[in-house]
Amino acid sequence: MDIRSLRYFVEVVQLNGFSRAAESLFVTQPAISRSIKKLEDELGYTLLIREVDGVKLTEEGDILLAHAKQILSQFSCMKKALQERSGPISGVLPVGLPPVIASTYFADIIMAFSQRYPQVELKILELGTRKMREAMLNGEVETAAVMLPFADDRFEVHPFSTDRLMLLVSKQHPLAIREFVKFSEIVDEPFIFFSDDFLINELVVSACGVYGKKPTISGRSSHLDLVTAMVRAGVGVTLLPDSMWQNTSSVGLSVIPVIEPILAYDIALATVKNHHQSRRAKAWHDLALTILKANRAR
């Protein structure tokens, strides 16, 4: 059994045919057939059944497929690790950031990283909690910032800050002149929510649940500008992190602290445990922690 045989096997299954796999891999169909026959002889099981419209996995073939994908993924990671041991840090680094905190915490980090590592292309993906978790496990995001709880023992997290949610209302709203607002006073307000997988939504839903109610949702968007525009237009109210208003204009809006309860949460850098990290990702992680700690100490 070798890596090439496993790659041929996986390709045949994924493309549902020997001829399609041969075209994709730029090899002859007989070569793939011989390789898979050798696999079957070595393992002592029939792995694939040829059918008119493609191939069908046997139970043993299904077991091999799962393990073969893992082996090929690990082999790819090993090759990358060996290739990255020398030379300047370069390539593409996919970084996941929650939209509501991306510019607040990471604008300086992005600029500093780009200046220090000009050969690295930063690919910033703004994702909610659920999609961030999936993207990291699928390898689409190599390192990320997440809002806790990010309850999953497959990840390693390094908390770097604590934030709280503030009420955002239009200047014409009756609560706009208040110095603070109890959550019980806004539980019946129409809310502007982010997309389904954003942790902020869950915090609001949980707080409403304390009073035995479900939030009334009058609007929803994954874009911060649209959320604030709907609030400014009086469509509803929303809750957003306190930190983002330190460097952001709130023209036409009132930002008010919420108490009883204070809706606080931690923010952390996250990576996948037991997964090879490129030098790009390690450099980002180290620089980000250094700058975040320095900013927090101010």
Image (tube, helix red, strand yellow):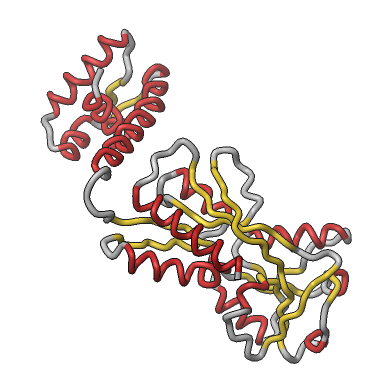
Judge whether 123 appears above or below 133 on screen.
below
x, y percent for residue 277: 39, 44
- The total of numbered circles placed on residues is 0
x, y percent for residue 224: 57, 74
x, y percent for residue 195: 59, 63
Judge whether 7 appears above or below 184 on screen.
above
- Can residue 197 be seen in this snapshot? no
Judge whether 289 appears above or below 296 on screen.
above
Q: Residue sitting at 73 percent across and 90 percent down? A: 171
- Can you tell which quarter of the image residue 104 is in? bottom right
Q: Residue sitting at 34 percent across and 49 percent down? A: 279
* Residue nearest the observer in this picture, 298 or 164: 298
x, y percent for residue 14: 32, 35
Q: Residue sitting at 60 percent across and 71 percent down? A: 298
* Residue nearest the observer in this picture, 54 or 28: 28
* Residue nearest the observer in this picture, 58 or 27: 27
Q: Quadrant of the N terminus?
A: top left
